[in-house]
Image (cartoon, grey):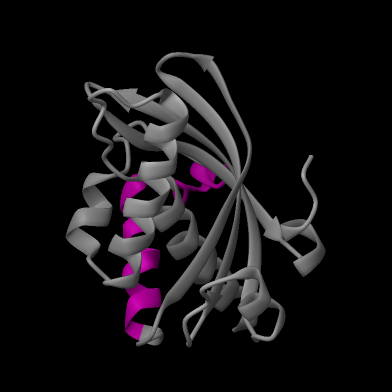
Amino acid sequence: MLSNMLKNLYWVVFLFCSVSSCNTNNETPEQQIQQFVSSAKTIAESRDIVSLKELISEKYADDNYAYNEGNKQALVQKVTGYFWRYKNIHIFTQINNLTFSNPNNAQLQLLVAMADLPINSIGTLLNSKARLYQFDMTLIREKSDWKLLKASWRTATTDDFFNDE
C-alpha cells in the first residue's frame, strides 16, 4: 500500500514539476524553465488534470516503460489517483543543476516538498511534515512549449535543499 502511494505521489510531483508551457518572448532559456516549473506547480496545486496532461510530451517514457507503466497515459492515471486521494496539495520547489544539451533540450534536478499546508519558505519547510523528493528530469521544447520527456526520482532530505551542487 505504501509503495503504491509513493508511486502515485511520485507521478503527481513528477508531472507537476516537469511540464508547463513557457512564454519564450524575450526570456532566457533559464527563465523559461523557471516559468515552466512555476506554472506546473500552480497547475498541480489547482488539481487541473487536463492542463497537466497537455504538458507531457507524447514521447514521454520513464524506466517503467518496458512494463507498459511508464508512458504518458499511465502517468496521467496515477496523477488522477493522487488527486482523488489528497484533497489539499501544497508544493515548494527548488531548481538545482539546470543544463542545456542544446537549445531544445534541458536537464534539471528539481527538489520538491509536498504537504497538506502551504510551504512558503525554507524556514516553513524545516518546520513542516512535508514529503521531500528529488527529480532528475529531461525536458524538450516542442514548438514553443517545454514538455516532460523523461524523469527519475528519489526521496530527498532537508539537507538537499541547502546543498548547492
Is residue 128 visible from the viewing direction of this image? yes
Q: Residue at x 26, y 26 (%)?
A: 24
Residue 65 falls left or right of residue 160:
left
Q: Residue at x 55, y 47 (%)?
A: 64
Is residue 71 visible from the viewing direction of this image? no
Report the residue that reaches farthest toward the top.
102
Q: Main secondary structure of the magenta part?
A: helix
Question: Whole-percent x and y of residue 138?
Answer: 51, 33
Is 66 magenta? The answer is yes
Residue range of the region highlighted in magenta in the rendering: 63-84
Question: Whole-percent x and y of residue 52?
Answer: 27, 55
Say which of 29 and 133 sits in front.
29
Is 148 magenta? The answer is no
Say which of 150 and 21 sits in front.
21
Q: Residue at x 39, y 85 (%)?
A: 85
Residue 96 falls left or right of residue 90:
right
Say which of 63 and 37 sits in front.
37
Give residue 146's quadrant in the image.
top left
Give residue 59's quadrant in the image.
top left
Residue 90 falls left or right of residue 159:
left
